[in-house]
Amino acid sequence: MSPVMTTRIAFKALGRNKMRTALTMLGMIIGVSAVITLVALGNGAQVRIEEQIRSGGTNLVTVMAGNFTMGGVRGGVGAASSLKIEDLDAIKKEVSNIQYIAPGVNTRAQVIAGNQNWSTRLEGTDVDFPLMREWSVKHGMFFSPQDVSSAAKVAVLGQTVSDQLFGPEVDPTGQMIRVRNQPFKVIGVMASKGQAAMGNDQDDTIFAPYTTVQKRLQGQQNIQNITISASSADAVPAVADAVAMLMRTQHKLIAGDPDDFTVRTQEEIADIRTAFIETFTNLLAGIAAVSLLVGGIGIMNIMLVSVTERTREIGIRMAIGAKGRDVLLQFLVEAIVVSMIGGGTGIALGFGFAELATRIWDYPTQVSMDAIAMAFGFSALIGIFFGFYPARKAAALDPIVALRYE
């Protein structure tokens, strides 16, 4: 019997019980659509992480104060004030392949402008900051080296802070704000940057010279972090290693002493978030795989019922010359058709759910061809695997016994 005739008979047999066939496909549809949707969401999350990492700057290496042990007490990032401007100067002098570098001194404060107030993050930094972060100024300008050297009381607002204090679409350049009873002149507003890789709003920040934050607001000489932009992506590991070795020398740490600082790169942060998303996606994909398995068992169950119902038909076909392999092939094709149609419908629904997530929740999704090929191939394998036993059982029927079956 030709494959075309076998396929036609398979479709005709499945069409006799449309509702039963549709319900048999349901497990495959749910499983495949879930796989496609989850993979699309996982890929979209990866894309968003990469965008957020890029929005934070390029080729960044961050040195943070902390990570020390004293008297059996261990501290993490920020638990020690071990970084000084001398460390910054040493990095500038000793470490090569550095494009930009800026110290950081951060605090939170209630900011007042007229009759409005807002609690926000105040970031003391240097003139290289907008260059390494690729962050443009929307209104006014960023502060100058002279502002840093003189500890001038000037501020550049993030877009969120500007909107909260002065209203949307307002240029507050030249206005005065008060930070801990200290007057600051607004000299600029940064362009909107959006959410950072760790989830915080980058626009909910005020930038000021780090010397101003040290002297006017904190009364200290230490710095909390040093952010470095390497000259290229390939230079990041070498810069990170060189900075770590130099910091140990600067802080007079001997062999065996733990670091009193922490060096991190963007790749490490991205890897942590990506590993979490991959684990979560794999967990959900495992649940979707169970749906596929249940769908396969459903196919086998329905095919066994079909063999029983069509025993007399099988006997007639074998009596007029059909061979056992023809019967086996027919039932196997029926199982594959059910699983493939279910898989195709599931792929279409997966695309639909992914697009729905993008339109309703503004969540990036990316359906990969690998996921489609995997889902479609898995559907075919499910049909072959779970359809083989019923098909073999049908092919093994004795024609005489089958003809007598009522």
Image (cartoon, rainbow, N blue to C red):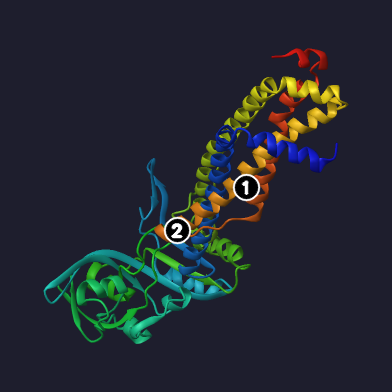
Quadrant the N terminus occupies: top right
Q: Is any atom of residue 362 visible in this view?
A: no
Image location (x, y in percent) of residue 48: 49, 61
Closer-to-camera residue (222/212): 212
Mark sitting earlier along the chain (1/2): 1
Check residue 363 in the rendering and tell me which mark sits there, or answer none: 2
Image quarter of residue 359: bottom left
> In the figure, is residue 398 to the left or right of 103?
right
> Which amino acid lies under the numbered mark 1 shown in the image of this protein?
Gly
Q: Residue at x 82, y 14 (%)?
A: 400
Distance, label 1 to label 2, CA atoms, is 24 Å
Identify residue for label 1: 344
Q: Residues within 10 Å of mark 1 (few under 14, many from 20)?
A: some
Image location (x, y in percent) of residue 57: 48, 70
Q: Residue at x 35, y 53 (%)?
A: 79
Q: Secondary structure at mark 1?
A: helix
Q: Is residue 25 above or below residue 257?
A: above
Closer-to-camera residue (278/40): 40
Q: Secondary structure at mark 2?
A: loop
Image location (x, y in percent) of residue 275: 53, 48
Image location (x, y in percent) of residue 122: 29, 68
Quadrant the C terminus occupies: top right
Image quarter of residue 173: bottom left
Closer to the camera: disc 1 or disc 2?
Answer: 1
Image quarter of residue 236: bottom right
